[in-house]
Image (cartoon, rainbow, N blue to C red):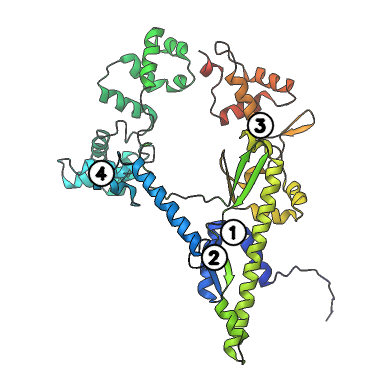
């Protein structure tokens, strides 16, 4: 039997370190939920609201009430014309939205149709299969198999749903969607029908002359038909409430100011002050020993560590956001398109912390500024090109491309090659294919689609 002695290194993370890392990675709402759970498990820990009126001096409370009263009076005067009766006043109360989803709207129409119950059930099923744009992605065979009915019965139910509002709903593709709307309008136009059935891709590219050549029709008639197509709705279901769950983003910090002068305010409304209860502090100051006092001691130590972790998270988050704002001042001044290359290491050096700490802290965090709400990770960008020795981000290049296209001669739009040449003269060296790729990402058409 041979004995071998090996030396290995292992990083063992204690329970406290794990808890500290977990709290650091939490978003504001996650932290609040976590603290609320802890207060149930640890009676020593308490959440003290930012506005604790029981602890507030009487004169401050009085001033707040007077201010609220005056505000309410101003609001009553301002809205007096809009709130004429009690029913309208109800609109100002918090209540569930009465807006309908597309499925609910379709089913409400099906329910008043004078059709057999079996047919109505098939129509209800089809209404539930519609996507958010109002399209039916299942074919008749799939519907028939799902409901154990014939394909003819499925097809009949589909046509019933297609006859309902909004016009174009329950189509299988864009061409069918537009044709349903054209028939609903009572338009009989052979040129229009042929374009919708066979040449919608060319319509998207604005190639009217090629369409006229293919269908052997006058350019004027083709132009008139395309004008009708542009008035139709390619997504009849888009105006309805989505049935998917809505996720609300609560920013962890708000950045306010302008022209390089910015103030960072961490969102305290969702992370109220966490304290150690004075009641339990008094218990351990009392005389005597025993299990109760030992229990309180252990809970206080646990609570003290949580308070320390939350305080450290707050300080770290503030320092990281401060460093980001300092590095990305041009973005906060001018908005998207002016973001600069930035790495985790850049922020780690400025904030005086490790790169991994920056990564953990930024994960799942959002900041709000006058340009919108952005995840912290949005501000970390790699340079994709060089301009006069400085890195340029993809967003900056896209903004430059858009600016060139916005200011081009619409009778002679710039080709992707010419745009690439213009960018090169500005110090940005990218290929024609990269220009086409970025243009596609921004949803900007090619030459034929931009030519007037």
Tell me which label, 2 or 4, sits earlier in the chain.
2
Q: CA distance from mark 4 to mark 1?
A: 42 Å
The residue closer to the viewer here, 427 or 69, is 69
CB of mark 4 within 8 Å of CB of mark 3?
A: no
| Element class at badge 2 | helix
Q: Can you say whether 107 is above or below 330 in the image?
A: below
| Disc 1, SS | loop
* Separation of residues labelled 2 and 4 (CA atoms): 42 Å
Instruction: Give the x, y percent position of residue 399.
Output: 62, 28
Number of the front mark, 4 or 3 = 3
Q: Which mark is residue 396?
A: 3
**Of callouts 1 and 2, the N-terminal one:** 1
Q: Secondary structure at mark 4?
A: helix
In the rendered image, the quadrant that contains the N terminus is bottom right
> Decide: marks 1, 2 in contact (CB < 8 A)?
yes
Q: Residues within 10 Å of mark 4 (few under 14, many from 20)?
A: many
Name the side, left or right, on which 344 lies relative to 151.
right
| Residue 73 visible from this viewpoint | yes
Q: Badge 4 is on which residue?
A: 107
Q: Residue furthest front?
A: 59
x and y, in percent, of residue 78 in the image: 36, 40
Rendered residue at 30%/38% (across/down): 81
Mark 1 vs mark 2, CA separation in Å: 9 Å
Q: Which quarter of the figure has residue 342?
A: top right
Please, what secondary structure does the residue beneath circle 3 have?
Answer: helix
Residue 335, relative to residue 203: is it above or below?
A: below
């Amino acid at each position: 039997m041979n004995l071998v002695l090996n030396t290995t290194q292992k990083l063992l993370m204690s329970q406290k370190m794990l808890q500290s890392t977990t709290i650091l990675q939490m978003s504001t709402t996650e932290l609040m939920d976590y603290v609320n759970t802890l207060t149930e498990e640890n009676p020593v820990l308490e959440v003290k609201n930012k506005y604790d009126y029981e602890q507030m001096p009487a004169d401050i409370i009085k001033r707040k009430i007077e201010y609220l009263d005056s505000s309410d009076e101003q609001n009553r005067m301002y809205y007096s014309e809009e709130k004429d009766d009690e029913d309208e006043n109800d609109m100002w109360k918090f209540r569930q939205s009465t807006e309908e989803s597309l499925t609910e709207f379709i089913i409400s129409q099906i329910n008043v149709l004078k059709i057999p119950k079996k047919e109505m059930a098939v129509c209800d099923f089809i209404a539930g299969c519609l996507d958010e744009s109002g399209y039916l992605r299942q074919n008749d065979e799939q519907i028939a198999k799902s409901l154990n009915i014939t394909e003819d019965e499925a097809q009949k139910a589909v046509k019933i749903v297609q006859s309902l509002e909004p016009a174009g709903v329950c189509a299988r593709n864009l061409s069918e969607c537009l044709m349903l709307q054209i028939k609903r309008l009572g338009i009989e136009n052979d040129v229009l029908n042929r374009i919708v059935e066979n040449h919608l891709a060319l319509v998207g590219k604005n190639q009217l002359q090629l369409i006229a050549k293919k269908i052997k029709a006058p350019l004027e008639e083709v132009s008139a038909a395309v004008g009708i197509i542009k008035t139709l709705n390619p997504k009849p279901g888009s105006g309805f409430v989505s049935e998917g769950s809505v996720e609300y983003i609560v920013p962890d910090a708000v950045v306010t100011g302008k022209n390089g002068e910015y103030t960072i305010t961490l969102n305290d409304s969702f992370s109220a002050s966490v304290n150690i209860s004075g009641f339990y502090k008094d218990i351990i100051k009392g005389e005597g020993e025993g299990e109760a006092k030992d229990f309180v001691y252990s809970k206080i130590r646990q609570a003290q560590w949580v308070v320390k972790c939350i305080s450290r998270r707050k300080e770290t988050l503030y320092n990281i956001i401060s460093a980001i704002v300092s590095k990305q001042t041009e973005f906060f001044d001018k908005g998207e398109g002016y973001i600069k290359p930035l790495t985790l290491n850049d922020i780690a050096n400025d904030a005086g912390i490790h790169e991994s700490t920056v990564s953990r802290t930024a994960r799942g965090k959002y900041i709000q500024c006058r340009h919108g709400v952005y995840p912290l990770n949005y501000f970390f960008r790699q340079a994709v090109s060089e301009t006069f020795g400085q890195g340029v981000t993809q967003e900056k290049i896209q903004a430059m491309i858009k600016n060139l296209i916005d200011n081009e001669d619409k009778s002679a739009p710039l080709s992707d090659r010419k745009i690439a040449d213009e960018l090169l003269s500005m110090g940005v060296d990218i290929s024609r294919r990269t220009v086409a790729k970025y243009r596609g990402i921004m949803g900007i058409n090619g030459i034929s689609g931009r030519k007037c």
